[in-house]
Image (cartoon, rainbow, N blue to C red):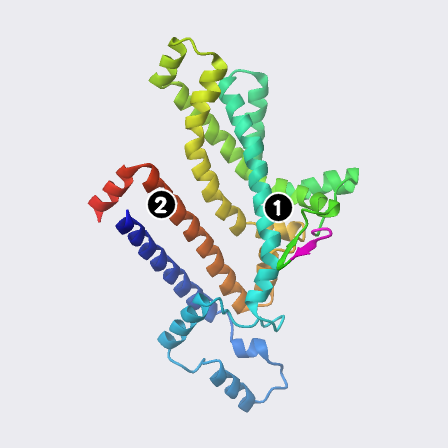
Amino acid sequence: MLAFIIRRLLQAIVVMLTVALIAFTLFRFVGDPVNMMVGIETTAEERAQLRQDLGLNDAIPVQFARFVANAARLNFGNSYQFKTPVIDLIADRFPATLELAIASAIFSLLIGIPMGVYTALHRRSWLSNIFLAASLVGISLPTFLIGILLIFLFPVTLGVLPSFGRGDVVRIGFWTTGLLTASGLKALILPAITLGLFQMTLIMRLVRGEMLEVLRTDYIKFARARGLTDRAVNFGHALKNTLVPVMTIAGLQLGSIIAFALITESVFQWPGMGLLFLKAVQNVDIPIMSAYLLLVAFIFVTINLIVDILYAVVDPRIRIDARATA
């Protein structure tokens, strides 16, 4: 088991180094950092001195090694636009993105699982057909269009929910939250639905497919033959085995929600990391762009690593297969 964990850790490090190389290479050619940091009145001598201070005259491998070492210490430099450390900007925006991602994940699970179970148990009912048709709409429509439609319906037409912003927030230590205020909770509803709608339809269809598959297995037939009630068979046996792969996919999707929240944050002007990244792209703020890319990759790698280890704990065959292919 220890060898398996070490092997997965080494693979995760290789992935992070690859992402760091991509970020370093990609953003190196976006623009000249010196031009982003100084004005037109800066002399050539001052520009040369600043280039020397930033280490831009060093060899490329030296610059990359320094970039990786600084990133490992969460030192991403100062933002060109805000003139403050990037890590402070991200730490200030991270609570908003994480709360939005968790709220959308809870929404997708609470709505998607019951809909998936119902459509599996009542395949021919009219309500199941409506759920399946609605899931096609949820998958087909782009996120920004769903957000605009919700804004038109609730804030503009009905006037019941805010159309942008995070509402009033409360600071608890380093963490800012809108979950403890009424305006914060209202502001969270529409972005969470917009971001979680695609995940909800995905989970609904996954639960439906897994449930139908489990209901055909022999042990379900045996449970029915023993005289168990439909309620005990469907929810005590079938649903319990259905949720194992569903929870795995849901955990992996949490990383996707955090990574791809930038469109929703842009539509609702949600002050999270995604909106910060979009503004950084507009202003060619390379430190923020590279830090965002590395942090998103770190979240993905960490979640995948945890899932791999949990898989190996639950199913020892995975460790054996990994050892055989090593």
Label 2 is placed on what type of residue? Ile
Measuring 40% from the left and 22% from the top, which residue is drawn there?
214
Label 1 is placed on what type of residue? Phe
- Is 167 magenta? The answer is yes
Local secondary structure at mark 2: helix
Task: Tell me which segment is drawn in magenta.
Answer: 166-172
Measuring 57% from the left and 61% from the top, which residue is drawn there?
90
Viewer-side residue, 131 vs 273: 273
Q: Which residue is mark 1?
A: 144
Viewer-side residue, 259 vs 73: 73
Contact, CB < 8 Å: mark 2 with mark 1?
Answer: no
Quarter of the image for residue 125 reads: top right
**Taking the image as drawn, is residue 249 in sight?**
yes
Q: Which residue is mark 2?
A: 309
The label shown at residue 72 is: none
Measuring 51% from the left and 24% from the top, which residue is drawn there?
117
Residue 71 at x, y percent in the picture = 45, 67
Q: Outermost residue toward the left? A: 324
Measuring 47% from the left and 19% from the top, which residue is drawn there?
234
Q: How many marks?
A: 2
